[in-house]
Image (tube, rainbow, N blue to C red):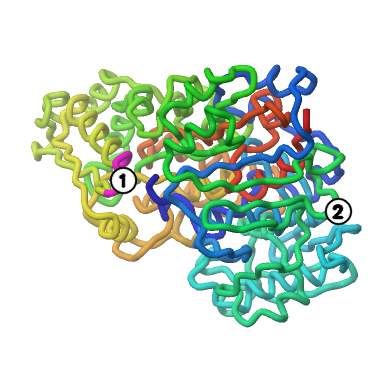
């Protein structure tokens, strides 16, 4: 398997999920230990291979020994060479995924329904009116594995560590944000946010970090000289599992005594006495382990998942829902042809998204729901319907070759539809470059298809150009050498704010930079006052209605201006076996994305499963 793409998964952001669309205070989420999660089918845009109802219920007569473990499978070549329980060591990737079940976050957010927030180590999280401070209430009754009580002081110590330590390039907050004063009063912690000059900074957009931050004990942190290098093996934890055995190819976790119980869907707490993380030598080895029933759970997009389901249709489930994350292409809006909104709109109409989905390397089976097709010009998939401006319900995104050509003809373009012969109204040939990294074959395939579509449908002299990943990444960040370049958007947060920030963050927002300077978001440098007003409302207004209106303004700019080339959704792959454990997330009960690399999802699922 190729390594995770650094531009798709940010350091801390990828490991700390976010909530809602910045509506309301966090404390309005589910706080009880057995509350039913909100959101149903509308939160789940994908489908599944194999059933997700009958095979996810108890009582089918299957006999499973009481000590049956859950075997989590990785499909090589990833290995864990050195034990590192340290939750700050995100560079270890899947190698220390197991610590998701050891160090717990303040809250868990359902990626499939951002309004479904479950308080975990915090019992309440509230922001002040201007979002320059957040107040976190520590949950009562939680104890560390060394027997000492969990307190608000532990929360404060963790955020002090984030504030005061150089975390080796890990971006905890956005590039211009920082943590200010952190104070404890009783069982609450107040965290202030400041600008680089020390003045108060509105930080609502960072509550993803607050919600998902995993907490460490103050007394233990005081013994660590370097939090980025210390393995922290044996550190006190609040989570349900501890390391029983560690080898380079297998990590065994056991349910520890004295766990406080968590806030999952199973009031009895985790049902599995052991969770084994097994590192198989290759994707094929993992695939065979899933088919045979040796592996219980995987999140890899493997090529023969139809065989996995067919091996035991009653218990094998291949589930690929979608959240808000999509694949799209930045369009260089500062230079022709994509400086012209008419050309951008025509380009979006020239792409057959069903065909695009079918050629993706991760489109491994014929199961429906392999990836959502974007059908709305807002860029929202089905999982985001609840956030869509109702006035844009008819803003469809469809493949319409003749309609795209007609748009260009009406705008004065010449030789429209003549392959490679398209000209601007002044007679100048239309040439453009679709840029891709040679190390990523899925992006090369995608870029080739887009170039071919713009050539055959519109007539543009469009070519795919590939280069090495480092050069491509740098060029894309500075906005050079491309007319269109792909990126995944919305994968570092589950609310629509993060989706739109990735695509069209506006001047004045962290991560936006003018052409020629290094940027993080909106690398096509699309500038629009309506979108800017919308972002300002979402980030600064204490009024939920005003923030919702701001979101709608951003969507209206998306529809009117077509600032990016929308391609399609990225499915959240998961395969699991219900032979011995039930109440996995499914179409009928999408309470979490079934991916164990996500700390919130892994914790929620293991705390929700029940033994047959």
Is residue 389 visible to us here?
no
Residue 363 position, x and y percent, is 40, 29
Secondary structure mostly seen in the magenta stretch: helix
597 relative position to 102: left or right: left
**Residue 68 placed where, x, y %?**
72, 37
Which label is found at residue 260? 2
Query: What residue is shown with label 1?
Result: 440
The span shown in magenta is: 439-443
Is 571 above or below relative to 127?
above
Left or right: residue 54 compared with residue 575: right
Q: Is residue 440 found inside the magenta-colored segment of the image?
A: yes
Query: Between marks 1 and 2, how big is the CA–CA gap?
Result: 44 Å
Please identify the quarter of the rendering in which residue 415 is found.
top left
Residue 181 in view (yes/no):
yes
Helix, strand or loop at label 1? It is: loop
- Which image quadrant: the C terminus? top right
Q: Residues within 10 Å of mark 1 (few under 14, many from 20)?
A: some
Of mark 1 and mark 2, the one earlier in the sequence is 2
Question: From the viewer's perspective, is residue 400 above or below residue 96?
Answer: above
Tell me the mark number nearer the camera, choosing from 1 and 2: 2
In the structure shown, which secondary structural element does the residue marked by tag 2 occupy?
Answer: loop
Instruction: Decide if residue 427 is on the left or right side of residue 98.
Output: left
Residue appearing at x 69%, y 70% in the figure? 159
516 vs 449, nearest the viewer: 449
Vertical placement of residue 324 versus 408, above or below: below
Q: Nearer the viewer, residue 559 or 468?
A: 468
């Amino acid at each position: 398997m190729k390594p995770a793409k650094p531009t798709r998964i940010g350091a801390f952001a990828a490991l700390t999920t976010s909530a809602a669309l910045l509506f309301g205070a966090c404390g309005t989420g589910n706080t009880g230990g057995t509350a039913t999660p909100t959101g149903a089918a509308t939160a789940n845009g994908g489908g599944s291979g194999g059933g997700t109802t009958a095979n996810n219920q108890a009582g089918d007569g299957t006999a499973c020994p009481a000590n049956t473990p859950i075997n989590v499978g990785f499909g090589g070549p990833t290995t864990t060479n050195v034990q590192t329980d340290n939750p700050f060591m995100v560079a270890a990737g899947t190698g220390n995924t197991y610590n998701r079940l050891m160090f717990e976050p303040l809250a868990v957010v359902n990626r499939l329904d951002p309004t479904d927030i479950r308080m975990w180590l915090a019992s309440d999280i509230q922001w002040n009116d201007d979002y320059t401070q957040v107040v976190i209430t520590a949950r009562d009754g939680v104890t560390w594995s060394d027997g000492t009580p969990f307190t608000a002081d532990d929360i404060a110590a963790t955020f002090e560590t984030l504030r005061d330590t150089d975390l080796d390039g890990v971006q905890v907050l956005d590039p211009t944000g920082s943590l200010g004063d952190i104070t404890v009063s009783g069982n609450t912690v107040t965290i202030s946010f400041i600008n680089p000059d020390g003045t108060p900074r509105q930080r609502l957009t960072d509550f993803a970090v607050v919600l998902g931050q995993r907490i460490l004990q103050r007394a233990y942190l005081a013994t660590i000289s370097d939090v980025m290098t210390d393995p922290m093996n044996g550190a006190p934890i609040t989570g349900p599992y501890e390391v029983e055995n560690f080898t380079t190819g297998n990590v065994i976790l056991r349910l520890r005594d004295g766990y406080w119980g968590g806030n999952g869907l199973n009031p009895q707490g985790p049902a599995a006495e052991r969770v084994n993380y097994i590192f198989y030598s290759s994707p094929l080895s993992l695939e065979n382990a899933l088919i045979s029933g040796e592996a219980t759970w995987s999140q890899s997009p493997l090529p023969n998942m139809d065989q996995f389901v067919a091996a035991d249709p009653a218990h094998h489930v291949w589930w690929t829902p979608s959240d808000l994350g999509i694949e799209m292409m930045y369009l260089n809006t500062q230079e022709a042809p994509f400086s012209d909104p008419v050309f951008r709109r025509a380009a979006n109409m020239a792409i057959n998204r069903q065909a695009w989905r079918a050629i993706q390397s991760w489109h491994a089976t014929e199961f429906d729901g392999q990836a959502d097709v974007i059908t709305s010009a807002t860029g929202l998939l089905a999982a985001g319907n609840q956030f869509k401006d109702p006035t844009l319900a008819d803003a469809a995104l469809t493949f319409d070759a003749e309609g795209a050509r007609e748009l260009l003809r009406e705008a004065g373009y010449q030789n429209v539809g003549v392959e490679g012969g398209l000209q601007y109204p002044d007679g100048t040939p239309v040439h453009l470059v679709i840029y891709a990294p040679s190390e990523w074959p899925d992006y090369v395939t995608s870029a080739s298809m887009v170039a071919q579509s713009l050539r055959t449908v519109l007539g543009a002299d469009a070519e795919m150009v590939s280069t090495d990943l480092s050069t491509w990444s740098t060029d894309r960040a500075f906005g050079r050498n491309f007319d269109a370049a792909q990126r995944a958007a919305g994968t570092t947060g589950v609310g629509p704010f993060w989706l739109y920030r990735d695509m069209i963050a506006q001047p004045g927002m962290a991560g936006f930079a003018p052409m020629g300077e290094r940027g993080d978001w909106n690398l096509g440098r699309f500038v629009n006052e309506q979108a800017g007003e919308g972002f300002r409302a979402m980030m600064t207004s204490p009024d939920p209605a005003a923030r919702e209106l701001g979101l709608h303004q951003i969507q209206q700019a998306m529809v009117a201006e077509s600032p990016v080339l929308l391609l399609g959704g990225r499915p959240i792959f998961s395969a699991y076996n219900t032979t011995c454990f039930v109440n996995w997330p499914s179409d009928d009960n999408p309470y979490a994305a079934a991916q164990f690399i996500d700390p919130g999802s892994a914790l929620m699922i293991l705390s929700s499963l029940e033994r047959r």
